[in-house]
Amino acid sequence: MMRIFPVLAVCFLLAGVTIAQQAPPALVSIQEVAQGLPADGSRWLTFGGNYSNHRHSPLTQITPANVSRLKPLWTFQTATLGNFETTSLVRDNVLYVTGPQNVAWAIDARTGRQIWRYRRELPQGLTACCGLVNRGFGVLGDRLFMTTLDAHLIALDIKTGSVVWDATLEDYKTGHSSTIAPLVVKDKVIVGAAGGEYGIRAFIDAYDAQTGKRAWRFYTIPGPGEPGNNTWAGESWKTGGASVWVTGAYDPEQNLLMYGIGNPGPDYHSESRKGDNLYSNAIVALDADTGKLKWHYQFTPHDVHDWDATEVPILADLPINGETRKVVMFANRNGFYYTLDRTTGKIIVAKPFVITTWAKEIGADGRPVLIPGHTPDEKGEVTCPDLTGGTNFWQPSFDPSTRTFFVNAREVCMTFISWKPTYTPGERFTGGSGQRVKPSESPAWGALRAIDPATAALKWEFKFLSPSTSGILTTASGLLFSGDSDGNLLALDSRSGKLLWRYQMGAPLHGTSPTTYIIDGRQHLLVPAGTTLTAWAIE
Amino acid sequence: MPAMTWRLFSTVVVSWALIGPALHAQTRNPYEDNPDAILAGMGGYRVRCADCHGTDGRGVRGPDITTVWSTGRSDEGLFNTIRRGVPNTEMPAFAAPRASDRDIWQMLAYLKTLAAPAPTDPPRGNAENGAKLFRTLCAACHKANGTGGRLGPDLSRIGTGRSRDVLLARIRRGSEDFRAGFEPVTVTTADGATVQGVKKNEDLFSVQIMDNRERIQGYEKDKAKAVENGKKSAMPVFGPDRLSDSDLDDLLKYLQTLRGFDPTVKQQ
């Protein structure tokens, strides 16, 4: 017996060493990430569902005919202040969710029960602009990637939520922050810096997913000697903002990243930064391996209304005028809808999708034809849309089967006022503000609009009493899920805009949309609203 | 401790001893109505606050802060909110030395000019008669100091929140913009009954109202025959035929005395 024990112990130790030395299986391959939403509904692994940001599911169990039989399965509560703006990831029956205040969870998708929780200790005096939110994880292998309000990018162990590496983007004390959902492309994690209201000089960064080392940086404001630096008068490029806080798209065929860039700073004061102010309010196309700029298109040159172009770009190949065009679709905060050629950045279609009073049209040269009298000053001027814009960061959707672009649009005007600001590191640097226009003079309302991207023509609209800030999910069964500003979760027929079903969630879906996936053979609908996540399925 | 540091330290301690208790006891803004401070406060407000709260203080990204006094906040409480911020929200702390006490008081002095009655109000009118007129003409819908109706806004602090001119215009000429929670609405129910009241909330599918008998109740739109928004405020217009200029002066004088209601039960 005495002899057997050491033998057994040695065997056990050897076996243990062998197990420990075996590399754990890579949980999430880059092929899975690149595949987008599979037909079996087992995964949702990127912000927009696929690299093209369609936010359109192939699942068909929930249909216009049975959607009214949706029943809640469970509700998860964050127990934190602030609301969800996240797109949850799902794989192997587990949800990976980021919340406000940089808290994150792994949640059992069957029951809504927490598996692990991560909470980042945030520094005192954080000046994170605008909202202490987070828009979701990226994932590769056994790691989740999350940006933080104090301007870091962290990798978490997907099984435990413990920190694997922690990379600093920039110093949060100078107003830098990050809320964007990382996009994983090949072996890199793509993120951007927020803080456009604090006089930062923003950037898009790529980090090595394994090591956390920075692979490249693209400054969204060119430095001295670089093309475009002369679009900023004097030293204004140093504090020009041009932040990056909404995940872009990736075109594998061209190996191109396409990201929308935020407003120039100071937001409203024209004299402080004469020139076009590249690449603020533009979409930039970058080589995913090097970060080199391939093309850009600036929606609003020299913006003075805080109209970040941080909306979600959507990619598709569309038949237009008898030929198949590789396009990027973009409903912009400035009130215009654009279909661009994504190989060149040239305009194919550009038309207003809400009432716009600042520009007559987009000219043949791609520049807006300005209507005079819309530069804010001390006295103020009324412009439509308002600073929140014709739409904003909440996600549109694209149904490839009907070639329809869906967006939540706002019809709101505002008095813009401007004054000369002084830059102090870490303090707000906007040079103005706005005043709401009285409802009796200009009522504020909104509509969910279905747009033909080949012509920018309106197919249908569903009107709201007040503008919705909800993202949109569509499914191959012809359903559209979104929400209104009053907390109603809505299911519409995506072909007609007819309301099919609704439920009062108690808080609006703000800056996020439902997602959908299959658990144990049943299609689930996951709805982030306020501080809750609720899973639904057909009974 | 080096001599210079010690000297500085003792100066700070002495200064604190002199200023600290004074500030601690401070409940009213020492710069209120000071024209120079108000001007300086406007500069500070515009740089630090207007981006979120609007140049007129009525809210853009952040909430309307012109009604803070009329909802019962004190100068000292507001000072502390600015100094400490609101944790876990976008409202930052304006800590020293980034913002001095004087900076904050000046910004509050300016903000109060956006919120408070103009100091040039004429001193005419008899508040006692105004109180009687209020009970006769207004109290069916408006509460003041704990008595009155609920259909209209509670006016117990209206004297801190509206200028005489604004009150006068509201009484004489009405208003095209309804205050949220007081928009007139009429619901026709499935059985044909008509319910009139003011709207407390609404979404695409339902409306919640206080009816003219002060019953609060929700109605589902698809189960109602009609839900119609009124175009005119439920607040009647009082022209000179219904309220003489002299009585109007008295009523305004009374309204200006309404500067807060203490609901604490006082033991006899």
Image (cartoon, coloured by chain):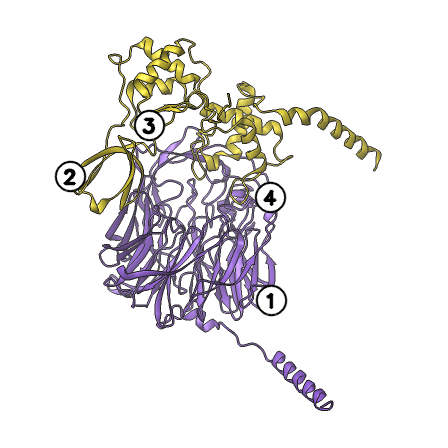
Chain colours: A purple, B yellow
Chain bearing tag 4 is A
Answer with the quarter of the image where residue A246 lies: bottom left
Q: Which residue is mark 1?
A: A211
Tag 4 and tag 1, C-beta contact below 8 Å: no
Q: Quadrant of residue B117?
A: top left
Query: Quick one: SS at disc 1?
Result: loop
Q: Earlier in the sequence, mark 4 or mark 1?
A: 4
Relative height, residue B82 to residue A45 (above, below) = above
Query: Are there few (<14), some (14-19), or many (20+) residues within 10 Å of tag 3?
Result: many
Residue holding disc 3: B152
Q: Is residue A204 visible?
A: no
Give the letter of the chain under mark 3.
B
Looking at this view, is B28 or B82 the one in front?
Answer: B28
**Residue matched to label 4:** A125
Residues at marks 4 and 1, CA–CA distance in whole angstroms: 30 Å
Q: Chain of mark 2?
A: B
